[in-house]
Image: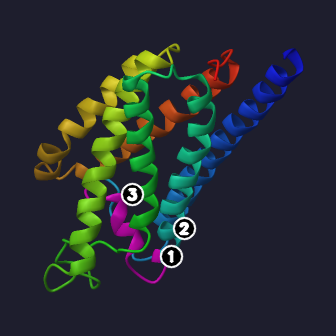
């Protein structure tokens, strides 16, 4: 029994390290995509805009990375979250965030900036799907980390979750104030930070009994 517990704990730590590595790759690819043409404004324009243009495939890959790193985080979280309804809901919400993140790669957004030469003349079907997926993903992430912060308590978990929720609430007024891109990126970084810390904390927890 003891050796089995140690084996599972070691595997959980491996998944936690993969979560951290995925987050580092995600941030790096985001920076690379931002530096490539057509040089969208990170303060005003959404991260999804990076998926449109000659190097849009970089952001498409990054959406998949985001889904995969979330899946890696879910492994130790599933191991440690109490088998209660609230925990199952939180895990399911993070699963929804992961799935929607991957799907975003296949449905490019519509560029709303009329000054861009890649701007669409009007809303497209794939743009509408992208927007819907993004809305569902963001809502799932915010609700999921807020719920699971009570199930997997760790230092800073709840403040990070509430700050992410606040950033999500402020996203619409921030877009009107021309700083929507900045607030969105803050939200994404907070979610990534929570996933990395939560996966690490869950990997060190004893784990629930099956």
- What residue would you read off at disc 1? 57
- What residue would you read off at disc 3? 100
Q: Which element carries disc 3, helix, strand or loop?
A: helix
Image coordinates for residue 51, horizontal then vertical, percent: 41, 71
Q: Is residue 110 above or below residue 33?
A: below
Gap in angstroms between the C-alphas marked 2 and 3: 14 Å
Q: Which element carries disc 1, helix, strand or loop?
A: helix
- The magenta stretch is 44-56
Which mark, by number, is residue 45?
Answer: none
User: Going from the N terminus, do you reach mark 2 or mark 3 first?
Assistant: 2
Q: Decide: marks 2, 3 in contact (CB < 8 A)? A: no
Q: Give the residue at x 49% y 23%.
A: 83
Image coordinates for residue 72, horizontal then vertical, percent: 62, 44
Q: Which element carries disc 2, helix, strand or loop?
A: helix
Nearer to the camera, 144 or 112? 144
Does residue 60 appear in this view?
yes
**Residue 135 on the magenta segment:** no
Does residue 111 appear in this view?
no
Quarter holding the N terminus? top right
Corner quadrant of residue 92:
top left
Q: Decide: marks 2, 1 in contact (CB < 8 A)? A: yes
Q: Which residue lies furthest to the right in this view?
A: 3
Q: Horizontal placement of 178 versus 164: left or right?
A: left
- What residue would you read off at disc 2? 61
Q: In this view, does 85 lie above or below 187?
A: above
Q: Give the residue at x 67% y 35%.
A: 16
Q: Is residue 112 above or below residue 170?
A: below
How dense is the environment of label 1, judged by Cα within 10 Å: few (below 14), some, or many (20 and up)?
A: some
How dense is the environment of label 2, judged by Cα within 10 Å: few (below 14), some, or many (20 and up)?
A: some
Image coordinates for residue 155, horizontal then vertical, percent: 52, 13
Image coordinates for residue 34, horizontal then vertical, percent: 46, 63
């Amino acid at each position: 029994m003891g050796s089995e517990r140690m084996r599972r704990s070691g595997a959980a730590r491996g998944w936690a390290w993969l979560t951290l590595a995925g987050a580092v790759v995600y941030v790096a690819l985001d920076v690379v995509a931002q530096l490539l043409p057509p040089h969208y404004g990170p303060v005003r324009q959404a991260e999804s805009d990076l998926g449109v243009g000659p190097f849009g495939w970089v952001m498409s890959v990054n959406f998949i990375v985001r889904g995969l790193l979330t899946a890696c985080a879910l492994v130790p979280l599933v191991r440690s979250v109490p088998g209660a309804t609230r925990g199952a809901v939180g895990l399911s919400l993070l699963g929804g965030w992961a799935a929607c993140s991957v799907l975003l790669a296949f449905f490019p957004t519509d560029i709303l900036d009329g000054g861009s030469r890649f701007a669409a003349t009007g809303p497209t079907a794939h743009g509408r799907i992208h927007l819907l997926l993004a809305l569902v993903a963001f809502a799932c992430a915010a609700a999921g980390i807020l719920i699971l912060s009570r199930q997997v308590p760790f230092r800073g978990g709840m403040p990070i979750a509430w700050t992410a929720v606040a950033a999500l609430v402020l996203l619409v007024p921030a877009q009107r104030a021309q700083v929507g891109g900045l607030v969105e990126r803050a939200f994404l970084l907070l979610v990534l930070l929570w996933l990395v810390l939560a996966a690490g904390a869950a990997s060190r927890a004893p784990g629930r009994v099956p």
